[in-house]
Image (cartoon, rainbow, N blue to C red):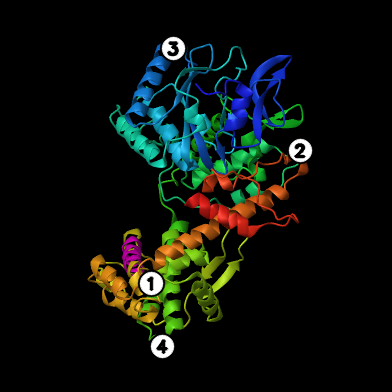
């Protein structure tokens, strides 16, 4: 057993943040509500610890509840889940979470994992083990659990039943083990009966994995009115419930599912229009919502979602899955990119600059097709790695393309957001088609194309651009290899008959350029990490003084993901020390 037997000392050692959530009292009695509190001293009341930081999870906790007064089910689910973890060699700590028979199964992660992966694990476990409450792993901003040994808000304290605390203090669970665990959970879920809830859905109604209905059709963005409602300031007299309901109606109309809507809410907590999702009114002040129960965010959204769905579909026949707005946008994008690529692939190249522009334009075209829109975010590093040039070359090429009027800078980069570019319809287009001629029996009318036609044209373009860029981004086609223009020619000549990878590998060996793209990728990954760390520091420095609780200094054993949670290095003059920060990231990645 670990030396950390004091619950507060253990919490301080495990916590990924400088704050915890402390349970509150009403009329002298504890309630299942919490408030965020600094960890400067041990609280007098029971507390819970965050599992994630900056949208990545450091811990996974399977919260096995006994809310249905069925301890046999909770015991069964805990035992079966332990067997599955043992099968995958995942170390864990099993705690009795409360006096009524619940459990917490704690896993500390060697590699922090994305919020989406944690969410997938939680929902998959819920489908297989009915007593698992997935809430703590669904929202990285607020998801928290009482740590081992800590007191319960009702009575008693968490007790360790199985496992060693060193499994949490010295993590061993890798991301690959978690991915393998998810595969197993999904396999177990698929083997279950189709309907395990005992509820029959109405005839013709489509439901998501939570059993909540949605309108089938092509997913589209929220309407301008909903975007305005999201961003409009909230005053003390604002009906925040009505505001949120207006946004929910828009999400249902846009063919979103409940899961997609809650994912959006999780990642846009800062928007004023969503304040009702995260807080509730309490005597003219707003307090955080419960993590569980009828007043939790997900319960409130689920009730609104059902009401909005019923309101929209009750006797309304217009929601049949058609989406003329999306088809028009996709049509415009597909035709614009088709003409642009046709010109770009057939024009005469007179030098390296034009060849570089050809690569960058094809890369932007690919991004636009993938997004079904002509306005896209794209940073120079991502463009460079996609088409096989350097970041500097990509940046210079983007400026040339803007000067030629082929693209425009719609929005400058801000913080971690990249530049936003808009691709323009070509003037004096020859209307050349590279892809339509390959598709038989297609209605290619520019004014009334069928969805199937659009899909076929778009897919043909996607396949061609992907194949072309896979060749140009190979080491053999970099400036150290055969050269930019010659690499483009090589890719164009082999569109219909792809080059074998072995040929390109041998070509790279011949020109002694093996590893060029890998070196670039490593460099750009380091630069992104350094930029993210510095932006995290700026966010902290510009936050209200009352919320700044101080952060720990870096430690030699910190991982690259953990470093961005630490204090940014400073020189003796208290200026940011970017050189030291870079060396720390390099050492952590080694």
The image quarter containing residue 445 is: bottom left
Instruction: Give coordinates of residue 48: x percent, y percent.
Output: 61, 26
Q: In x, y percent, where is residue 326?
A: 45, 57
234 or 93: nearer the eye?
93
Instruction: Name the N-terminal-most of marks 1 and 3.
Output: 3
Can you say whether 74 is above or below 390 in the image?
above
* Residue at x 66%, y 52% (from the top left corner): 569
Sequence order check, earlier mark of 4 and 2: 2
Cα separation, mark 1 vs mark 4, equals 23 Å
Which quarter of the figure has residue 298?
top right
Looking at marks 1 and 4 on the same chain, the residue that comes earlier in the sequence is marked by 1
Q: Give the secondary structure at mark 2.
A: loop
- Residue contact at pointers 2 and 1, CB within 8 angstroms: no
Cα distance between the residues tagged 4 and 3: 76 Å
Circle 3 — which element? Answer: helix
521 to 30, vertically: above or below:
below
Q: Range of the magenta residues? A: 454-469
Q: Nearer the viewer, mark 4 or mark 2?
A: 4
Q: Real-space Cα distance between discs 3 and 2?
A: 46 Å
Residue 71 is marked as 3
Q: Secondary structure at mark 1?
A: helix
Residue at the image position 31 percent from the left and 30 percent from the top: 188
Location of residue 484 with respect to 410 vertically, above or below: below
Question: Mark 4: which secondary structure?
Answer: loop
Where residue 59 appears, as percent x and y from the top left, is 50, 34
Name the residue carrying label 2. Answer: 237
Which residue was labeled with disc 4? 350
> From the viewer's perspective, is the residue at label 2 or at label 1 nearer?
1
């Amino acid at each position: 057993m670990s030396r950390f037997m004091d619950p507060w000392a253990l919490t301080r050692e495990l916590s990924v943040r400088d704050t915890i959530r402390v349970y509150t009292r009403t009329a002298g009695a504890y309630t299942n509500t919490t408030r965020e509190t600094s960890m400067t001293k041990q609280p007098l009341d029971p507390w819970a610890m965050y599992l994630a930081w900056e949208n990545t999870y450091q811990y996974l906790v399977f919260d096995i509840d006994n809310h249905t007064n069925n301890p046999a089910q909770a015991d069964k689910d805990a035992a079966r889940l332990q067997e599955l973890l043992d099968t995958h060699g995942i170390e864990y700590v099993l705690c009795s979470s409360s006096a009524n028979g619940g459990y917490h199964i704690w896993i500390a992660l060697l590699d922090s994992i994305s919020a989406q992966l944690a969410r997938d694990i939680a929902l998959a476990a819920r489908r297989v083990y009915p007593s698992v409450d997935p809430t703590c792993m669904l929202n990285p901003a607020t998801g928290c659990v009482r740590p081992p040994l800590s007191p319960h808000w009702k009575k008693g304290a968490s007790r360790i039943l199985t496992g060693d605390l060193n499994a949490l203090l010295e993590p061993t669970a890798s991301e690959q083990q978690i991915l393998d665990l998810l595969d197993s959970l999904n396999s177990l879920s698929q083997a279950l009966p189709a309907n395990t809830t005992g509820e029959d859905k109405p005839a013709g109604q489509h439901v998501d994995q939570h059993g909540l209905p949605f309108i089938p059709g092509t997913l589209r963005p929220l309407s301008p009115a909903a975007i305005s409602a999201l961003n409009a300031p909230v005053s003390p007299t604002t009906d925040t419930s009505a505001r949120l309901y207006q946004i929910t109606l828009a999400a249902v109309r846009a063919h979103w599912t409940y899961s997609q809507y809650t994912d959006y809410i999780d990642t846009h907590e800062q928007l004023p229009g969503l304040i009702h999702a995260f807080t509730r009114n309490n005597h003219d002040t707003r307090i955080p919502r419960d993590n569980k129960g009828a007043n939790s965010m997900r319960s409130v959204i689920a009730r609104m979602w059902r009401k909005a769905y019923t309101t929209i579909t009750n006797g309304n026949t217009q929601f049949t899955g058609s989406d003329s707005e999306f088809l028009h946008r996709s049509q415009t994008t597909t035709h614009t990119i088709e003409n642009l690529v046709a010109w770009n692939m057939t024009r005469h190249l007179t030098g390296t600059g034009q060849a570089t522009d050809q690569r960058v334009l094809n890369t932007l075209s690919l991004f636009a097709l993938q997004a079904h829109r002509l306005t896209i975010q794209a940073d120079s590093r991502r463009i460079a790695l996609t088409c096989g040039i350097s970041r500097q070359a990509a940046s210079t090429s983007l400026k040339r393309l803007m000067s030629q009027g082929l693209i425009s800078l719609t929005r400058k980069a801000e913080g971690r957001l990249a530049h936003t570019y808009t691709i323009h319809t070509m003037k004096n287009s020859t209307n050349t088609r590279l892809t339509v001629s390959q598709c038989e029996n297609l209605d290619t009318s520019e004014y009334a194309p069928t969805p199937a036609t659009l899909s076929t044209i778009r897919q043909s373009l996607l396949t061609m651009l992907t194949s072309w860029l896979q060749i140009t981004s190979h080491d053999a086609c970099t400036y150290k290899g055969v050269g930019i223009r010659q690499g483009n020619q090589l890719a164009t000549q082999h569109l219909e008959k792809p080059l074998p990878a072995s040929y390109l590998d041998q070509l790279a060996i011949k020109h002694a350029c093996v590893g060029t793209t890998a070196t670039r990728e490593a460099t750009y990954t380091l630069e992104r990490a350094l930029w993210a760390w510095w932006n995290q520091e700026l966010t902290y420095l510009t936050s209200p003084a009352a919320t700044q609780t101080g952060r720990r200094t870096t430690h030699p054993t910190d991982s690259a993901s953990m470093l961005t949670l630490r204090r940014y290095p400073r020189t003796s003059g208290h200026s940011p020390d970017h050189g030291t920060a870079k060396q720390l990231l390099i050492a952590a990645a080694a």
